[in-house]
Image (cartoon, helix red, strand yellow):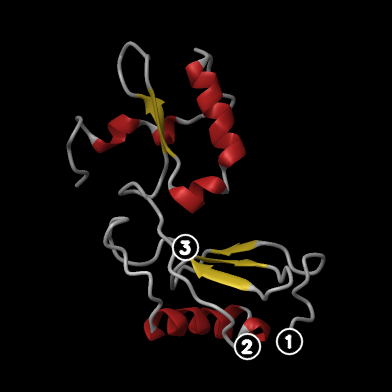
């Protein structure tokens, strides 16, 4: 039942469930409601990613819908597997790569980063211009992972 899921009635949401995965929803733009688990799935790479959604994927989404958005728990229209890039702590990297500040390294983390494109863009523009970013970006420093090549522990 698409009633109540039009953009005017149903905002884009992010659900941060302390007892389960974070997930998000998009309103029905004419092809159904979009629901996805944020930061789920296994570690892979673009060459080897399994793009076939499984029954466990659908079951995980349906469990969330049954609990939080039961009216959206209708028939499945389409299922796809997305590929996200993430740092080990799931935060961006926005920092100078070298002490001379000649290179800015930005890892905006795929779809997650897309949601923050304007803020990331402002921070990066400030860094490449030699200015102080408009917001505190210390959380996104590269050295939080330790010396170059170190694996966070």
Question: Marks 3 and 1, how far apart in space?
Answer: 24 Å
Q: Residues within 10 Å of mark 2 (few under 14, many from 20)?
A: few
- Viewer-proximal residue, 55 or 80? 80
In the displayed image of the protein, which residue is found farthest to the right?
8
Q: Is residue 61 above or below residue 138?
A: below
- 102 left or right of 152? right
- 20 left or right of 36? left
Q: Is residue 130 above or below residue 57?
A: above
Q: Is residue 92 above or below residue 90?
A: above
Instruction: Name the residue carrying label 2.
Output: 74
Q: Residues within 10 Å of mark 1 (few under 14, many from 20)?
A: few
x then y, percent, for residue 15: 56, 66
Q: Residue at coordinates 35% horizontally, 67% vertically from top-left?
A: 41
Name which of mark 3 and mark 1 comes first in the sequence. 1
Identify the element where label 3 is drawn: loop
Q: Residue at coordinates 30% horizontally, 65% vertically from top-left?
A: 42
- Viewer-proximal residue, 136 or 118? 118
Identify the element where label 1 is drawn: loop
Image-quadrant location for residue 139? top left
Residue 135 visible in the shown view: no
Instruction: Name the residue carrying label 3.
Output: 38
Q: Residue at coordinates 70% horizontally, 68% vertically from top-left?
A: 27
x then y, percent, for residue 65: 57, 81
Instruction: Name the residue carrying label 1.
Output: 1
Name which of mark 2 and mark 1 comes first in the sequence. 1
């Amino acid at each position: 039942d698409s009633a109540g899921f039009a953009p005017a009635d149903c905002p884009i949401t992010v659900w941060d469930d302390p007892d389960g995965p974070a997930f998000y929803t998009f309103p029905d733009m004419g092809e159904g409601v979009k629901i996805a688990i944020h930061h789920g799935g296994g570690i892979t790479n673009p060459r080897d990613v399994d793009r076939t959604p499984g029954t466990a994927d659908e079951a995980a989404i349906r469990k969330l819908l049954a609990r939080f958005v039961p009216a959206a728990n209708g028939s499945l229209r389409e299922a796809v597997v997305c590929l996200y890039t993430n740092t080990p702590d799931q935060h961006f990297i926005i920092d100078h790569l070298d002490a001379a500040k000649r290179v800015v390294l930005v890892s905006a983390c795929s779809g997650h980063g897309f949601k923050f494109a304007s803020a990331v863009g402002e921070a990066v523009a400030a860094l490449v211009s030699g200015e102080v970013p408009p917001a505190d970006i210390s959380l996104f420093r590269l050295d939080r992972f330790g010396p170059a090549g170190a694996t966070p522990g």
